[in-house]
Image (cartoon, coloured by chain):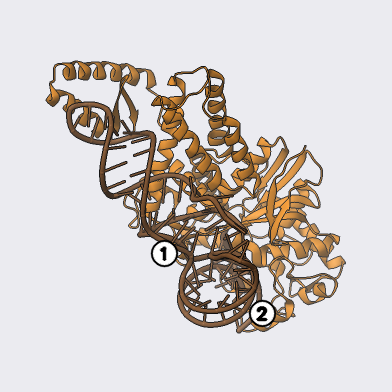
Chain colours: A orange, B brown
Amino acid sequence: METHLHIYNTLVRKKQLFEPIAPPHVGLYVCGPTVYGDAHLGHARSAITFDIVYRYLKYLKYKVRYVRNITDVGHLENDADEGEDKIAKKARLDELEPMEVVKYYTDRYHTNMDQLNVLHPSIEPTASGHIIEQIELVKAILKNGYGYESKGSVYFDVEKYNKDFQYGKLSGRNVEDLLQNTRQLAGQEDKKNGFDFALWKKADSRHIMHWPSPWSEGFPGWHLECSAMGAKYLGEPFDIHGGGMDLLFPHHESEIAQANAARGKDPVKYWMHNNMITVNGQKMGKSLNNFITMDEFISGDHPALTQAYSPMTIRFFILQAHYRSTLDFSNEALQAAEKGMSKLFEAFALIGSLKPSNESSFDISVHLNALESAMNDDFNTPIAIAQLFELSKLINQVNDGKTKLTTADIEKIRLVFNTFLFDVLGLLPEKGNQNDQLVDYLMETILELRKQAKENKDWTTSDRIRDDLAKLNIQVKDTKEGARWSFK
RNA sequence: GGUACCGUGGCCGAGUGGCUAGGCGGUGGUCUGCAAAACCAUAUACGGCGGUUCGAAUCCGUCCGGUACCUCCA
């Protein structure tokens, strides 16, 4: 399987040729959501970024096992290890069973992902379903001497680990700096060093999610689940681990440390990190309280939104930027994306009615190659989309009789659009098709009436038909061959 | 303070030593009964200052401005 796919590997901070550990198989692990709130634009970006990775790897004929976890325990509240489990806290406030909260937000997350046309992962494991694996991992770390027990909790001994391995190899930090910069944080009494992180945490009386363990009735530390589940389903090491840039430190750094401490080897060959969505240049996130949920985008019901945006518009908007760049949210940018995307779909819809010629005035394969090399260059979707715009321009030119294409090349263009626009980029025209035949028939009748009015130079009637249809978001387009129509 | 990164035309956003990215918006034109759509043409650019080079938006230095991580976060 020869490809030229290059992936930017955060571990070495440059693009590398992608060489799977055991081709044609590829293991892909992505940090999924913590299900204690609705998905927002940032979640959408991460999911879409790695959806593209998944789709393109499959396009390249790899056999991909894609694991994306659901975090339903473990992440602690603010005061580091003093805090309460996020989901438990939410449950207490709402007087719900924790698993009720988990189920509620997991379902909502799935709905949003389906709306965005994000493919389902091969496996979607939950942290609460892998407590045993996580306990085993803690045992292995303890056995190798890289952890210590303290008052029923177990911590990772970063200083000890750093003597034998390198803590900070992913994030570019060093332990000396960390020592100086984490000293003042509260709630560190039980730990040898401030930067030591919890592997197992003893539950206090308020804590309603807990499990038995050799050390205490408690719950796993927050980096453990990905280490345990990644290894379980993808092996050690596996190919690609993805997530948001904000997870780079300490989460992914600690995953590397845990794997080395337990088994003496790095867990992952290629680390990929998507950048953040920003609002007025600032990260969109919970703590800044400036996030907009997917449902709010779809309904338009948010003070920052001047209109509703379809999930496909959001997907397209996200794909128009490279995943490693920050992407700034604005209504203007969303609206530009909406218009641009519909232009692509309109061009695609025209392919079926193009008139073939005996020769082609341009070479389709040039564009196909350009699309592949864009995707091979660290999944450069903006360039790929630019290529699709080039193609749609050509389609329109053929439609206008300004350039020529053979029947075979028209089919080739259709195939390229199908493959890249729909399969690889995962964009779908979203006009409902429930009443297609009826609508087509009605439109045929209406446009026939308008044609007659025009022939009679009854402009009042013909314009009224046009304007009324516009109110229904139906656009009439007069061409040399007669009127066409489409949904706006 | 430490670490990583960014500053591109009205807006969004690729590119990273020489060859117009692209989209939205603007302007002019073709088409049209008038529009719209489409097509054609076109303007507006690489934060400041130095340096390297035949040549820099792209490399180096420096200054200015901004962001992320170091606490849960996609």
- Which numbered dot is residue A188? 2
Question: Does residue A138 show up?
Answer: yes
Disc 2, SS: loop
In the depicted structure, whether residue A108 falls above or below residue A164:
above
Q: Residue A200, percent across and down?
A: 72, 66
User: Disc 1, disc 2: CB below 8 Å?
Assistant: no
Q: Which residue is mark 1?
A: A280
Q: Residue A257, percent across and down?
A: 77, 65
Q: Given the image, on which type of amino acid does mark 1 rest?
A: Asn
- The crowding category of the residue bearing disc 1, from other C-alpha atoms within 10 Å (few below 14, some 14 to 19, many at least 20), is few
Q: Quadrant of residue A455?
A: top left
What residue is at 69 percent from the left and 80 percent from the top? A177
Disc 1, SS: loop
In the depicted structure, whether residue A29 falls above or below residue B57:
above
The answer for how far apart the CA atoms under marks 1 and 2 are is 36 Å
Q: Residue A406, percent across and down?
A: 53, 20
Question: Does residue A97 show up?
Answer: no
Q: Name the subunit of mark 2.
A: A
In the depicted structure, whether residue A418 falls above or below residue A265:
above
* Same subunit: marks 1 and 2: yes
Q: Name the subunit of mark 1.
A: A
- Counting residues from the start of the chain, the first of labels 1 and 2 encountered is 2
- The crowding category of the residue bearing disc 2, from other C-alpha atoms within 10 Å (few below 14, some 14 to 19, many at least 20), is some
What residue is at 39 percent from the left and 47 percent from the top? A336
Q: Nearer the viewer, residue B65 or A328?
A: B65
